[in-house]
C-alpha cells in the first residue's frame, strides 16, 4: 500500500527550486510521451516503407531509464512510494510521527549510499559502452546517481522534524556519504588504490558481518512501520553485499540493467492508458450502457458492476484506482437507484475492485512474465478461463442474492428495483460507449494474432484512448493531460523504484542459491503437492494483505518459482495462482488494501467494511482453490497456441 492516493500535490512554484522542478516534470512527461510516440512511428514506418524506426529498442530502453528515476524523484516529492505501513494504520498520531521520522531518516541514509555507489558505474562500468543515437549510454546513466541524490535530499526535507532538529536528516546525509567512502575511493583511484582504502573497505565488511542479523530485523520492522519498500530492499542489498565481502557498486549496475529491460516497457504505457480512462467519463458511459443491457433482470446491475470493474482494473492494474474512480458512481446506482442494501453494495464493490487482473492487458501479468521470464502471451491466454470463472462466479452469486431479495425473503432487506428494458435508450447508450466497449476486443485481436508486440500494444492503447477521450468525446482537454500524467507518476515511480532495487536484492539471493536450497528443503519437508499448494495459497493471501501486487510479484515470486519447479507446477499455472491469490488478499481482513480504500471511499468504519466483504471473500476463496487444484483451467487454451 502507498502512503497516499491520488495525484501529485501541485502548487505555485517560485524561484530556482520551482524552475528546476518544472524542468524535472517536463523531462519526465516528455520521456513518457516519447515512449508512446516512438513505437507508433515504428509501426507506421513498417506499414509504409517496410522498415522500422532506427535503433528504436535501444532508444526506448534509455527513455525508460530516464522515466524510472525521474518518476521516482517526483514520487518522493509527494512522499508516495509504495510501502506496507501496518503499524501506522493502527497507531496514535504520536506513534505515526515517530515512525515517520525514523522511516525518513533511514531512507536518507540508505539512498545516499546508493547514490554514491553509482559513481563507479559511470566512471568505469559503462566505459566504452554503446551509443544511443549520438549519446553514449553512460550519459543516460548519469540520471542514476543524480536521481538517487535528489531522492535522498527530498527524504531529508520531508522528515517531520521542527526547529533545530531539522538539521538531523542532513547530518545523516553526511553520515551516508562517509559510509559510502569505499565506493567513492574506488572511483577516485580506479586502478591503483592506496592501502588505506583496502583497510577501510575491510573494516566496513567486518562491521556489516557483525551487525547483519539485528540490522535485518530492524529493516523488516521498518518495512512494517511504513518505510518505502524500495528503501528496505536497497538496505538489505547493501547490508548483505557488504557482509558477504562484495563491493556494493554491484547494486547500481543491477539498477541500470533492471530499468533498461524490454519486459517492463509496457508498464508505464498501460498505466497512462488506465488513467486516461479513469479520468474521463468512460466509466459513466459504460455504466449507462450496461444498465440498459443488464438492468432488466434480477442481478443485472450486479453483473454490470462486476464487468465494469473488471474492465477498468485490467487497464489500470491497480485495484485502488477502480474503487476510487468508480466506487461512488456504482454505489449510487446499486444502493440508491436499484435499492440493494448498503452493506451488500459496498461488499460487492470492495471485492470486485481487483477482479480484472487476469485479463489483458493486465500489468501484473506483464510483470509476472518479465520477472519469471515466462511468455507473456501464454500468461494472458492462461488467465482467460480463470478470469471468466471468477467474474462469472461473482455475477451468479449476485444474481442468486438479488432473486432472493426480489422475492422479499430476506427479512429487513428491501425489495430490489428492476428496470424495464428500453431498446432505444440501450442502443443510444451503446452507441455512445462503443469505442470503449470494442477496445479490449481490438487489443486482444492485435496481440494474439502477433500483429503488435506488447510494447506496441501499449502505445496503441494510449493513442486510441487519447483520440477517443480527448478528440471524440472531449471528456479531457489538452491542458488536462499533464494532470493525468501527474496522477499516474506515483504508480510508475513506485513500481520502477521497486523493480530497480528488487533486481539488486534478487541478484544476491540467486547468487547464494537460496531459492534452490529452500526448494530442496521444502521438497524434503513436504512430500505432498496438494499440501504444498494449500500452504502456498495461505502464504500468498498473507502477502496480498501486506503488500501491493507489484511489490509482491517482484519480491516474493522469485522465491516461489523454484518451489513450483520442484513440485512440477507449470510456470504459467503458477503465475495465475500467484495473481488470483493476491487478488483475494486485497480483501482479506484485517489489512487487505481494498478494505482501507473502501473505508475511505465510502466513508464507513473499517470494521464494517470487513464484515460487508466476508461473503464475497468466501466465494473468492472457493474460486482460488478451484483454479489452484485444477491446472487444466489455466493450461487448456495453451494447446491451441
Image (tube, helix red, strand yellow):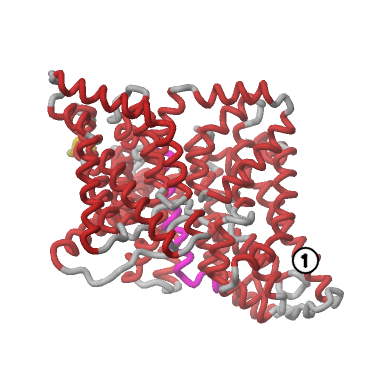
Q: Is residue 459 visible?
A: no
Q: Which residues are magenta?
A: 262-284
Query: Which residue has dot 1 on it?
Result: 399
Give above or below for 69 relative to 414. above
The image quarter in which residue 383 lies: top right
Say whether residue 259 is left or right of residue 447.
left
Picture residue at 69% right of the left edge, 35% below the top: 533
Position of the C terminus, as image quadrant, is: top right
The image quarter in which residue 179 lies: top left
Would residue 269 be counted in the magenta stretch? yes
Q: Secondary structure at mark 1?
A: helix
Q: Majority secondary structure of the magenta segment? A: helix
Picture residue at 67% right of the left edge, 75% below the top: 334
Say whether residue 408 is left or right of residue 183.
right
Give above or below for 216 relative to 283. above
Q: Which of these two is toward me, 373 or 586?
A: 586
Give above or below for 77 relative to 553. below
Q: Is residue 512 visible?
A: yes
Q: Percent from the top left, x then y, of residue 170?
A: 21, 51
Q: Percent from the top left, x then y, of residue 493?
A: 37, 51
Picture residue at 17% right of the left edge, 38% below the top: 134
Q: Percent from the top left, x then y, of residue 458?
A: 44, 50
Say whether residue 436 is left or right of residue 422.
left
Figure label count? 1
Picture residue at 26% right of the left edge, 25% below the top: 203
Q: Which of these two is toward me, 278 or 11?
A: 11
Q: Which of these two is toward me, 275 or 81?
A: 81
Would residue 263 be counted in the magenta stretch? yes
Amino acid at each position: 500500500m502507498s502512503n497516499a492516493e491520488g495525484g501529485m500535490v501541485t502548487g505555485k512554484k517560485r524561484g530556482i527550486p520551482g524552475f528546476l522542478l518544472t524542468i524535472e516534470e517536463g523531462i519526465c512527461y516528455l520521456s513518457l510521451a516519447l515512449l508512446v510516440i516512438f513505437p507508433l512511428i515504428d509501426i507506421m514506418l513498417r506499414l509504409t516503407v517496410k522498415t522500422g524506426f532506427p535503433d528504436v529498442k535501444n532508444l526506448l530502453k534509455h527513455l525508460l531509464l530516464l522515466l524510472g528515476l525521474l518518476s521516482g524523484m517526483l514520487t518522493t516529492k509527494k512522499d508516495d512510494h509504495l510501502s506496507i505501513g501496518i503499524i501506522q494504520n493502527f497507531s496514535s498520531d504520536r506513534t505515526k510521527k515517530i515512525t515517520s521520522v525514523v522511516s525518513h531518516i533511514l531512507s536518507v541514509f540508505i539512498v545516499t549510499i546508493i547514490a554514491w555507489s553509482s559513481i563507479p558505474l559511470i566512471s568505469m562500468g559503462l566505459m566504452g559502452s554503446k551509443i544511443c543515437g549520438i549519446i553514449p549510454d553512460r550519459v543516460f546513466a548519469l540520471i542514476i546517481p543524480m536521481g538517487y541524490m535528489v531522492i535522498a535530499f527530498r527524504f531529508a526535507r520531508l522528515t517531520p522534524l521542527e526547529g533545530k532538529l531539522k538539521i538531523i536528516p542532513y547530518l545523516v546525509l553526511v553520515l551516508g556519504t562517509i559510509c559510502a567512502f569505499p565506493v567513492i575511493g574506488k572511483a577516485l583511484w580506479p586502478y591503483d588504490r592506496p592501502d588505506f582504502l583496502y583497510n577501510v573497505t575491510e573494516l566496513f565488511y567486518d562491521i556489516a558481518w557483525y551487525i547483519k542479523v539485528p540490522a535485518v530485523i530492524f529493516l523488516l520492522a521498518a518495512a512494517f512501520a511504513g518505510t518505502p519498500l524500495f528503501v528496505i530492499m536497497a538496505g538489505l542489498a547493501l547490508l548483505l553485499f557488504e557482509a558477504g565481502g562484495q563491493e556494493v557498486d554491484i547494486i547500481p549496475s543491477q539498477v541500470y540493467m533492471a530499468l533498461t529491460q524490454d519486459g517492463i516497457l509496457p508498464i508505464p504505457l498501460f498505466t497512462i492508458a488506465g488513467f486516461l480512462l479513469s479520468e474521463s467519463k468512460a466509466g459513466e458511459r459504460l455504466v449507462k450502457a450496461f444498465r440498459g443491457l443488464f438492468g432488466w433482470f434480477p442481478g443485472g446491475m450486479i453483473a454490470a458492476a462486476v464487468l465494469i470493474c473488471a474492465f477498468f482494473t485490467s487497464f489500470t492494474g491497480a485495484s485502488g484506482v477502480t474503487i476510487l474512480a468508480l466506487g461512488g458512481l456504482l454505489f449510487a446506482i446499486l444502493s440508491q437507484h436499484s435499492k440493494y442494501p448498503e452493506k451488500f453494495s459496498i461488499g460487492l464493490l470492495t471485492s470486485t475492485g481487483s477482479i480484472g487482473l487476469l485479463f489483458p492487458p493486465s500489468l501484473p501479468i506483464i510483470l509476472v512474465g518479465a520477472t519469471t521470464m515466462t511468455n507473456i502471451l501464454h500468461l494472458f491466454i492462461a488467465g482467460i478461463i480463470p478470469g471468466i470463472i471468477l467474474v462469472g462466479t461473482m455475477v451468479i452469486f449476485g444474481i442468486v442474492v438479488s432473486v432472493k431479495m426480489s422475492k422479499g425473503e430476506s427479512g429487513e432487506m428491501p425489495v430490489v428495483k428492476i428496470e424495464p428494458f428500453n431498446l432505444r435508450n440501450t442502443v443510444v447508450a451503446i452507441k455512445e460507449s462503443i469505442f470503449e466497449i470494442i477496445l479490449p476486443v481490438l487489443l486482444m485481436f492485435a496481440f494474439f494474432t502477433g500483429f503488435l508486440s506488447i510494447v506496441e500494444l501499449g502505445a496503441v492503447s494510449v493513442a486510441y484512448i487519447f483520440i477517443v477521450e480527448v478528440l471524440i468525446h472531449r471528456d479531457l482537454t489538452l491542458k488536462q493531460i499533464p494532470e493525468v500524467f501527474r496522477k499516474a507518476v506515483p504508480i510508475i515511480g513506485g513500481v520502477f523504484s521497486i523493480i530497480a532495487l528488487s533486481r539488486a536484492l534478487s541478484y544476491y539471493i540467486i547468487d547464494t542459491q537460496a531459492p534452490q536450497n529452500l526448494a530442496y528443503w521444502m521438497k524434503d519437508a513436504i512430500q505432498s503437492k496438494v499440501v504444498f499448494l494449500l500452504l502456498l495459497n495461505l502464504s500468498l493471501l498473507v502477502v496480498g494483505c501486506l503488500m501491493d501486487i507489484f511489490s509482491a510479484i517482484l519480491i516474493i515470486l522469485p522465491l516461489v518459482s523454484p518451489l513450483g519447479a520442484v513440485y512440477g507446477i507449470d510456470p504459467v499455472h503458477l503465475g495465475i495462482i500467484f495473481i488470483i491469490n493476491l487478488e483475494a488478499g486485497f480483501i482479506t481482513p484485517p489489512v487487505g488494501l481494498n478494505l482501507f480504500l473502501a473505508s475511505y471511499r465510502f466513508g464507513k468504519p473499517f470494521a464494517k467494511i470487513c464484515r460487508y466483504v466476508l461473503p464475497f471473500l468466501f466465494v473468492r476463496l472457493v474460486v482460488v482453490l478451484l483454479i489452484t487444484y485444477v491446472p487444466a483451467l489455466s493450461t487448456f487454451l495453451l494447446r491451441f497456441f
